Image: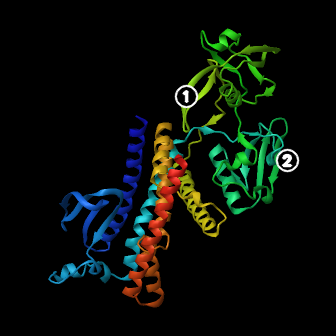
């Protein structure tokens, strides 16, 4: 069932974004008066098609589901002899350079527009997320900077934050730019305080991993209080009760429910000593977690369970925005994501970031399935991010991509002459080779992640 859900989520995500991208090319081509011969979802051999409209444009589905294209009347792709003069005037290469730029740029622009619409809708509706209240690991860089567990981060580098995703985003951006993190903090009993993580504290962080965690910052979770004990479970037999506050397991302190669960899962078949407080009084119980088989991303493993539920959820908030504010936040979000993506590409080119960051269809499908299972808001947010990535990638100055064609037309604007046909052919071959190399790298990284 998970495989089918993942496959469907992937097809809906990528298929819809390809359609919107090609619709951008199609609509602007029609607006500029260019005749469109075919609109295809997919590449390769056409498996289904119908003709519609005054130009009898062929709307097709092709065999290879990755990609799509809009085929216009183009002198570079076939002989135009015998066509009426009215059609010749609508041929692509006969249009002025600014129309050609508009037609080519319309595809990536459509991707950015869809992302803005999706984010604006999500911001207007509001998304329930963990607040910016943090936990801090002892002796970490965050602790050395003066941060404490229970602090609420209200602003980072003068940018207000309310939820964990905004906090994490600012941490990642600062790590990429290698500049300090200036934090405005609300602290219980002290009011507003300030803390700074210097730029050198962010140096050498693994940008592929959890950046806040590497600095010692995590989501603040509630105290590990027992919420329910299952009848007949190891926890009940040991005497655990609802309302007990868990303190330590075999002398190891537990800061929250996640820490307690991790210890219990690793203690299958063993007897552990659980220190707790009950009605303010200390108490120690002996219990033996029952060994059970559980499926994880690494396969089936043996874990320990005691049959008790512990408080886990952090403080959650929902912050809906007005339509105007939501639109502004959406545009800012798309812009920030574009700039961060370009910065990461630049760092991969210079060797400052690993090429492992290049991902392909397998990883996209995996995340599509995961976010779809998490809920509509998470899935729509994922689609928006993928749409931005498609827009940015298509604007890269690589021949065969939209960005390559925009580079040709920009040179034509500057020189007043089109790029020589021979130069274009050589660039196309080099671009195809580079694109194939990137695709192979992406698939290799996908397979490596699975293994």
Label drawn at residue 294: 1
Residue at 60%, 9% in the rendered image: 232
Answer above or below: position of 359 versus 35: above
Splitting the image into 4 quarters, where does residue 229 fall? Answer: top right
Observer able to see residue 163: no
Indicate the colouring scheme: rainbow
Reply above or below: 253 against 320.
Answer: above
Q: Residue at x 55, y 41 (%)?
A: 127
Residue at image location 41% in from the left, 50% down from the top: 13
- Image coordinates of residue 396 in percent, x first then y, are 50, 70
Q: Residues within 10 Å of mark 2 (few under 14, many from 20)?
A: some
Q: Nearer the viewer, mark 1 or mark 2?
A: 1
Q: Secondary structure at mark 1?
A: strand
Q: Nearer the viewer, residue 270 or 381?
A: 270
**Along the polypeptide, which appears first: circle 1 or circle 2?**
2
| Residue annotated with mark 2 | 144
Whether residue 398 appears in this view of the structure is yes
For image coordinates 33% across by 65% down, the residue present is: 69
Q: Which label sits on residue 136?
A: none
């Amino acid at each position: 069932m998970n495989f089918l859900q993942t496959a469907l989520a992937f097809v809906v995500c990528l298929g819809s974004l390809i359609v919107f991208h090609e619709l951008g090319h199609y609509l602007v081509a029609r607006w500029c008066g260019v005749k469109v011969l075919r609109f295809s979802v997919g590449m390769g051999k056409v498996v289904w098609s119908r003709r519609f409209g005054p130009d009898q444009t062929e709307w097709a589905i092709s065999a290879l589901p990755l990609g799509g294209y809009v085929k216009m009347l183009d002198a570079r792709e076939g002989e135009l002899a015998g066509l009426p003069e009215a059609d010749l005037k609508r041929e692509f290469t006969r249009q002025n350079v600014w129309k050609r730029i508009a037609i080519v740029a319309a595809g990536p622009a459509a991707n950015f527009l869809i992302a803005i619409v999706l984010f604006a809708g999500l911001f207007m509706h509001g998304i329930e997320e963990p607040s910016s209240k943090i936990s801090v690991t002892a002796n970490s860089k965050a602790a050395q900077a003066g941060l404490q567990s229970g602090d609420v981060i209200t602003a980072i580098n003068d940018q207000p934050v309310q939820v964990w995703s905004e906090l994490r985003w600012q941490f990642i951006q600062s790590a990429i730019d290698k500049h300090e993190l200036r934090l405005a903090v609300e602290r219980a009993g002290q009011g507003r305080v300030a803390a700074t993580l210097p730029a050198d504290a962010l140096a050498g962080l693994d940008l592929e991993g959890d950046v806040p965690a590497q600095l010692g910052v995590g989501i603040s979770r509630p105290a590990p209080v027992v919420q329910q004990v299952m009848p007949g479970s190891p926890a009940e037999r040991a005497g655990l009760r609802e309302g007990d506050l868990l303190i330590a397991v075999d002398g190891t302190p537990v800061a929250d429910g996640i820490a307690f669960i991790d210890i219990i899962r690793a203690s299958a078949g063993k007897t552990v000593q659980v220190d707790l407080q009950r009605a303010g009084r200390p108490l120690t119980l002996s219990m033996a977690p029952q060994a059970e088989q559980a499926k994880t991303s690494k396969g089936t493993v043996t874990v320990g369970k005691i049959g008790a539920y512990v408080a886990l959820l952090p403080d959650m908030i929902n912050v809906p925005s007005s339509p105007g504010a939501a639109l502004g936040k959406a545009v800012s979000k798309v812009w920030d994501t574009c700039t961060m993506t370009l910065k990461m590409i630049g760092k991969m080119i210079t060797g400052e970031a690993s090429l492992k960051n290049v991902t392909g269809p397998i990883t996209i499908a995996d995340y599509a399935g995961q976010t779809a299972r998490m809920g509509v808001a998470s899935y729509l947010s994922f689609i928006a991010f993928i749409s931005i990535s498609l827009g940015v990638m298509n604007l890269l100055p690589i021949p065969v991509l939209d960005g390559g064609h925009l580079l040709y037309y920009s040179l034509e604007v500057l020189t007043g002459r089109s790029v020589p046909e021979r130069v274009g052919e050589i660039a196309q071959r080099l671009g195809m080779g580079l694109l194939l190399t990137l695709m192979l790298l992406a698939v290799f990284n996908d397979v490596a992640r699975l293994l």
